[in-house]
Amino acid sequence: MEEARIVLSTTSSREEAQRIARTLVEERLAACVNLVENVTSIYRWQGAVEESLEIMLIIKCNVEKLAAIETRLHQMHSYDVPEFLVLPVEGGSSAYLRWLRESSQ
C-alpha cells in the first residue's frame, strides 16, 4: 500500500485526456487512468476567476513512477500549469494493489 498513489489531473478535451492516459499506460508509468467527463472547474487564473468544463484524469500508479509521470504529463499537456496532485493510498484489496504494482513495472 505504501507504494500506491493516485494522481489527479485535468484536461480541456477528451482527446487530450485519452492521449495522455493511453501514453501513460502504454509506457507502463500508470497501471490505469480513469477519465471523468463533465467536471466543472472554478479557479483563479492570472487574476481572474474562470470557469471551465474539463476532463478529470485519475491516474493509478506506484510511487517510483511519480517523477516520470509528472515529466511526461508536462510534455504532453496543453496547459501552462497542468494539475498534478498526488494522493496516498491508505488501503485497498491486496489483489488490486498487486495488479497495480505488476502492471506498471
Image (cartoon, rainbow, N blue to C red):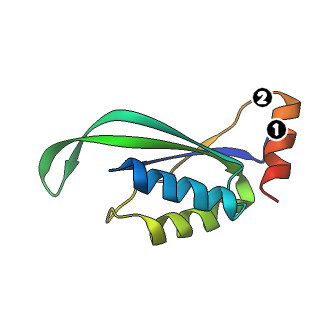
Residue positioned 84% across, 42% down in the render: 99
What is the CA distance from the residue labelled 1 to the residue labelled 2? Answer: 7 Å
Return the residue nearer the eye: 61 or 64. Answer: 61
Q: Name the quadrant of the C terminus.
A: bottom right
Q: Position of residue 17 (x, y in %)?
A: 46, 51
Judge the density around disc 2: few (<14), some (14-19), many (≥20) Cα neighbours within 10 Å. Answer: few
- In the rendered structure, the answer to whether residue 31 lies left or right of residue 36 reads right
Would you say residue 83 is visible in this rendering? no
Residue 83 coordinates in the image, percent (x, y): 42, 52
Vertically, is 34 above or below 76? above
Point out the residue furthest to the left here: 48
Q: Nearer the viewer, residue 2 or 27?
A: 27
Q: Earlier in the sequence, mark 1 or mark 2?
A: 2
Residue, disc 1: 97
Q: Residue visible at 11% across and 49% down?
A: 48
Q: Is mark 2 on a helix, strand or loop?
A: loop
- Relative image position of residue 53 (x, y in whole percent): 27, 39
Residue for badge 2: 92
Above or below, comparing residue 93 to residue 68 in the picture: above
Helix, strand or loop status at disc 1: helix
Classed neighbour count for the residue bearing mark 1: other residues with Cα under 10 Å, few (<14), some (14–19), many (≥20)? some
Please say if the residues under marks 1 and 2 sit with CB atoms less than 8 Å apart: yes
Amino acid at the residue labelled 2: Gly
- Residue appearing at x 59%, y 62% in the figure: 23
| 55 left or right, relative to 49 | right
**Measured along the vertical axis of the image, is residue 21 above or below residue 88?**
below
